[in-house]
Structure formats: C-alpha cells, structure tokens
C-alpha cells in the first residue's frame, strides 16, 4: 500500500513539475516575443517623406534632407520654407527623442526661405526622433512634427561642424537632388503616357480594320476610336508639358551647380587669404 501511495505521489509531483515548466516556457516565449518588452522595427513611426509639402498657418515647409552620422552622433536636417506673408517672424524648433527626451539642436544656417539644423548628442540606441516646428509670435501655435527613424534615416560617415558657407552648399546640393527626384517623376509619367498611346493606336487600327455585322456596332466602334484619338492628343499635350518641366528643372540644377561652384571658389579664396 505504501509503495502504491509513493508511486502516486511521484506521478503527481512529476505532473506538477511538467505543468510548471510549461508555464515558465510559455512565459519566456511571451516575454521575448512581445512587442511590449522588445518592440521591433515594425512599430516605428513612418518618417516624414522628403519633398512633401507640410502646411502651417503662415508657412509651408518641406524636408529636403535628414542625415545621420553614427560616428559623430549628429544629424543635419535641411528644411525649405515658403512664407505666405510678406513679413515673417520665422519658425522655432526643438528636437525630441522618443525615450531620451529633448536633444541639443541649433540652426547652423537660418534664412527666411530655409533652415539648416544640427542635432547633437544623439543617443546610441535611438529609434525615433522628431523635430517640432512652430511659428514665432503665433498665439496658440500648433506644432508641426517631422519624423525620422533608425531604419529610414540617411546614414553618412561623418557630419563635422562646418562653416556657414558649407551648409549653404549642402542646401543647394539637396535642391539638386530634389530636382533629380522631380525629373524622374516627370519622366516616369512620360513613359507611362507614351506606352498608353502605343496601345491606343494599336487598338484604333484593330477597330478601324474590323468588320461589323450591324450599323449599331460600327457606330459604337467609331465612338470608341474618337475617344481613343482624343485621349492620345491629351496624352501628347501632357508629355510636351512634362518635357518642358524637365528642361526647366535641368536648367535650374545647372544654375544651382554654378552657385555651388561660386561658393567653393569664394571658400578657396578665403582659405588662401587666411594662409
């Protein structure tokens, strides 16, 4: 009898241990897979798209660059500004890390139509950083937030402190990059419309050479041909407009490059003058 009781106790003890181990294993699994304890990059806030216009009360802004150097623990952010009023008091700003709070930020170049901001002491394990903008002298000013995250930020090797002229050059380079982006968009549209016209022209030939058993079907095909021809004309006009836009952007980029070259020449002259 004692042996049977002993066996029952052992069986009960073993079953209890197995249940306990299952609970512990499940707990560890939840701990290491839960987004609460170990948030993965899927939960990161989407970064503010470059070149997307952001609207404030008296200004419109767009982000043209957000660069980050791990080595220098610094960021360089370029923001283009368009004031709706002739007189603008400007824009205030601050940088905030999701976990570390406010970060040191300064305007290394500040003009009425653009800002070049430098963020320093960026935490080593940062995930998301926002720049908050608000208008000076604006009562109850609403915050405009620009975001980046560790996955999408433009990572560069170095971001040393520069002269104001060098930051101006960075801004002009960012504008050239923006022009290239817009050119690629226009060209993509041109390619799509050109391909569509080829398909429409092929369809027109098919309709014009087809035999129709009734007058009603022939008239219906005729209307389809008219619509296709009208669409082809519209597409060609759009292609011509886009082509002109591309030329204007190319010329603009050339002028921007000239400004960059002039600034570099001035910089070299100043360098020789210091020596």
Image (cartoon, rainbow, N blue to C red):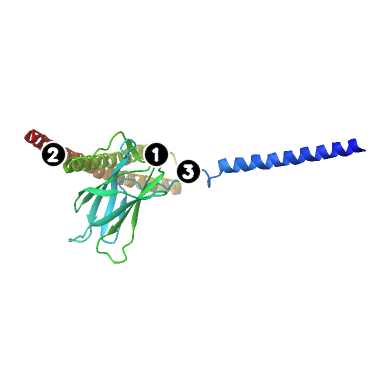
In the image, 264 versus 252, the foreground residue is 264
Query: Of circles 1 and 3, which is in front?
Result: 3
> Does the rendering let one see residue 66?
no
Looking at the rendered structure, which numbered label has been put on residue 81? none
Q: Residues within 10 Å of mark 2 (few under 14, many from 20)?
A: some
* Residue marked by disc 1: 203
Which residue is pictured at 25% across the width and 41% down the height? 174
Q: Residues within 10 Å of mark 3 (few under 14, many from 20)?
A: few
Give the CA distance from mark 1 to mark 3.
46 Å
**Coordinates of residue 238 in the picture (x, y in percent):** 28, 45
Q: Residues within 10 Å of mark 1 (few under 14, many from 20)?
A: some
Q: Quadrant of residue 163?
A: top left
Q: Quadrant of residue 84?
A: bottom left
Q: How many numbered marks are there? A: 3
* Residue marked by disc 2: 263
**Coordinates of residue 125 in the picture (x, y in percent):** 41, 41
Which image quarter holds the N terminus? top right
Compared with residue 52, is residue 18 higher up or lower down, i.e. above or below? Answer: above
Compared with residue 102, is residue 186 higher up or lower down, i.e. above or below? Answer: above
Sooner in the amino-acid sequence: mark 1 or mark 2? 1
Residue at the outermost front position: 2
Give the CA distance from mark 1 to mark 2.
55 Å
Q: In the rendered view, does 67 fall on the left or right side of 3? A: left
**Secondary-structure class at tag 3:** helix
Q: In the rendered view, does 17 fall on the left or right side of 118? A: right
**Coordinates of residue 45 in the picture (x, y in percent):** 42, 48
* Residue marked by disc 3: 42
**Coordinates of residue 97 in the picture (x, y in percent):** 38, 48
């Amino acid at each position: 009898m004692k042996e049977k009781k002993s066996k029952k106790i052992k069986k009960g003890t073993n079953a209890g241990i197995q249940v306990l181990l299952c609970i512990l294993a499940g707990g560890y699994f939840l701990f290491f897979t839960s987004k609460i304890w170990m948030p993965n990059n899927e939960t990161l806030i989407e970064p503010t798209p470059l070149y997307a216009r952001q609207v404030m009360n008296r200004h419109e802004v767009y982000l043209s660059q957000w660069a980050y150097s791990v080595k220098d623990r610094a960021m360089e952010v370029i923001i283009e500004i368009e004031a709706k009023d002739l007189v603008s008091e400007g824009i205030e700003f601050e940088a905030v890390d999701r976990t570390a709070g406010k970060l040191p930020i300064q305007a290394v170049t500040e003009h009425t139509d653009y800002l070049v901001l430098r963020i320093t002491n960026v935490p080593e394990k940062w995930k998301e950083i926002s720049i908050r903008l608000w208008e000076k002298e604006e009562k109850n000013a609403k915050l405009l937030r620009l975001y980046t995250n560790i996955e999408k930020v433009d990572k560069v090797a170095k971001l040393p402190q520069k002269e104001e002229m060098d930051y101006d050059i960075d801004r002009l380079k960012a504008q050239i990059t923006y022009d290239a982006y817009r050119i690629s968009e226009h060209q993509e549209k041109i390619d799509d419309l050109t391909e569509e016209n080829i398909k429409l022209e092929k369809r027109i030939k098919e309709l014009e050479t087809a035999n129709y058993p009734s007058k009603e079907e022939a008239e219906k095909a005729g209307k389809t041909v008219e619509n296709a021809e009208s669409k082809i004309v519209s597409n060609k006009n759009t292609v011509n407009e886009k082509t002109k836009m591309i030329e204007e952007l190319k010329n603009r980029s050339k002028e921007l490059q000239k400004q960059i070259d002039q600034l570099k020449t001035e910089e070299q002259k100043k360098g020789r003058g210091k020596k």
